[in-house]
Amino acid sequence: METKPGADFRARDAKNGAVYGPLIPSLGAQGFWGGLGGGREGIGDTLGGQQDYLVGASWRVGPGGLFDVGRKRSADRD
């Protein structure tokens, strides 16, 4: 049985993508700036600043992500 040049490399890349690809997280960052106003009896003389920051990492679980057994089996067959 003859194979096309590079076919074994493509199969190996597909398998590596199915096994290791889901381990790479999606990264995100957000920042919020603003002020909270108010005061005694509705006088706006006490304005306080506010900053919130968020950095997150997430992984997909299920189809196309972690624990996708069908995708790994499909890559092993090729």
Image (cartoon, rainbow, N blue to C red):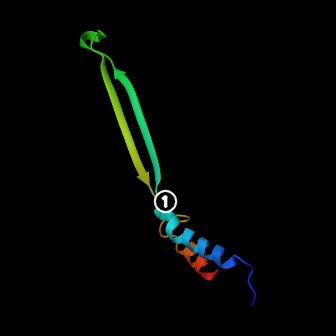
Q: Residue at x 49, y 59 (%)?
A: 60
Q: Residue at x 55, y 65 (%)?
A: 63
The residue most toward the front is: 5
Q: Quadrant of residue 18?
A: bottom right
Q: Position of residue 54 (x, y in %)?
A: 38, 41
Q: Residue at x 28, y 10 (%)?
A: 45
Classify 44 as above or below 27: above
The residue most toward the bottom is: 1
Is residue 62 at all visible to an observer of this figure? no
Q: How many marks?
A: 1
Q: Quadrant of residue 1?
A: bottom right
Is residue 35 at all visible to an observer of this figure? yes
Crowd band around label 1 with a 10 angstrom C-alpha radius: few (<14), some (14–19), many (20+): some
Give the residue type at disc 1.
Answer: Arg
Classify 13 as above or below 28: below
Residue 3 or residue 27, whichever sits in front: 3
Q: Quadrant of residue 37?
A: top left
Q: Position of residue 30 (x, y in %)?
A: 43, 38
Classify 37 as above or below 16: above
Q: Position of residue 59 (x, y in %)?
A: 46, 58
Residue 12 or residue 29, whichever sits in front: 12
- The residue labelled by disc 1 is 60
Classify 8 as above or below 60: below
Provide the secondary structure element on which disc 1 rests: loop
> 64 left or right of 6?
left
